[in-house]
Image (cartoon, helix red, strand yellow):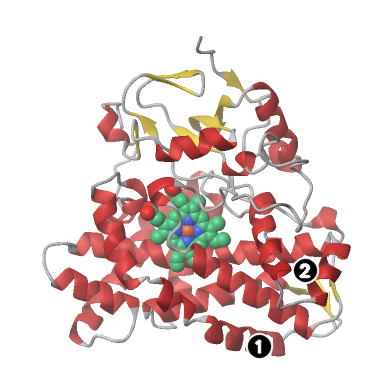
Amino acid sequence: MPTPLRELPKLSAKPGTPAFLADAPAHFRWMHAHAPVCRTKIAVINAVLVAGYEDCKALLEDDRFTRDRRKTGARTKSPLPMPRTVRILNNNMVTEDDPEHRRLRSLVAKVFTPKAIATLGERVEGLCAELLDDFPRDQPFDFIEAYSLPIPTTVIREMMGVPAEDMPKIQAGLRGLQRMTELIPMLTMLFVHMPRTVRILDAMIEAKRGEPEDDLLSALIRVEEAGDKLNHEELLSLAYTIIVAGYETTVHLIANAVLTLLQHPEQLAEIRADLDGPLLDAAVEEVLRVRGPIQTTKPVFPKQDLVFAGAELPRGTLIMPCLATANRDPAVFEDPDRFDIHRPKRRHLSFGGGPHFCLGAALARLETKVALRALLRRFEHIELAVPESQLVLQGMPLWHRYDALPLRVR
Ligand code: HEM
């Protein structure tokens, strides 16, 4: 018998609120124990969260769900008229279903190959070394500003061929994302920053059409010019998706990894003892499991009324697989809240699943591993420069990212 949907406990404990962030694992435990499919609000939006590991995996592979709510016949009119540029940037491969999604993804995959990524190791090492040279000794500094932000930003900027002077403008626009639950930052982002980003990308594409370079954007333009496979708006939207996806998440994976290792000094000592061995890879995977920077995917919507994981879901309901909860499913991971680099291998869901599985997973893993190894090699002593209680998690629902990570090294 399908069961009625339950609410997350306490009204204050909506994802992203201080009460939720103060002890997210406790909410995840409650979901597993009492309501593996439950109703909540994400900012002002009604949503249903799915908690179980197998359920999240199944949801991401289930073609009874669509990424495009319009296909469900539900009323989708936005309360505000959206500028054209916002519609362009929001309609990308992450929000398309197959076969349309497969078409776009295979075009990107053509230029975003494992071979192209594997060649980046040396460049990432060189970049890390330069950044480490500038670390102050024995003085507090923000690790995110100094290290975990510039690494993926520079790599994706160079891969895509974004001029150095344009990257800060694209990044400034994204800062509004951190306060998307507040009206003014949201409107500024939608009506000022996103249109400006489209103008920057338009100019870049125009310049590279005239003078192609050895970068991914030029390669995508060649794909566009090769036929009607990719139109200009799709090209814009793909370029934006790759640039943003390329650094927004990895910044926080590197920072979350350093914090987690500092909180587990015995495991850190084991990793330090064999920096070229497999423990560093295992640590990156375990950080992704317990502190992955994004805790959900884009929403999916049932195309018809249906029953999923024992719950009745009306057509058009906004559903989110809660990847962070799935990664702490006690049916799959023993003692799931424990950080343990020796855990038997079992794939976490932090890179999503199904046809939309993260296209940049190999790059994110490479950058994080190289960044950690270089940092640990360079400094024997690394410590938090503030009490842990002073670290501030950003109030973005279902993300795990700190405002800053003050460290001291020598
Ligand atoms: C720690 C770092 C990262 C995490 C945790 C992460 C996580 C994810 C997740 C959960 C998805 C699935 C989204 C969905 O189903 O709605 C995704 C998709 C995607 N990711 Fe990542 N990502 C990371 C880094 C990267 C990097 C470095 C790139 C590229 C340079 C990248 C490019 C993409 C793209 C293009 C997609 C869309 C794939 C599709 O729709 O087929 N990601 N990522």
Tag shown at residue 129 = 1
- Residue at image coords 73%, 54%: 392
Q: Is mark 2 within 8 Å of ligand 1?
A: no
Q: Is residue 302 left or right of residue 24?
A: left
Residue at image mark 2: 406
- Residue at image coords 70%, 25%: 33
- Residue at image coords 51%, 79%: 154
Q: Residues within 10 Å of mark 1 (few under 14, many from 20)?
A: some
**Residue 191 image position (x, y, % from top left):** 36, 54
Query: Which amino acid type is marked by label 1?
Result: Ala
The disc, 1 or 2, on the residue closer to the chain's N-terminal end is 1
| Between 180 and 34, the one nearer to me in the picture | 34
Q: Does 214 sit above or below residue 84? A: below
Q: Is residue 91 left or right of residue 172?
A: left
Q: Is residue 321 left or right of residue 13?
A: left
**Residue 135 image position (x, y, % from top left):** 74, 84
Q: Secondary structure at mark 1?
A: helix
**Residue 87 image position (x, y, % from top left):** 29, 50
**Residue 260 image position (x, y, % from top left):** 77, 59
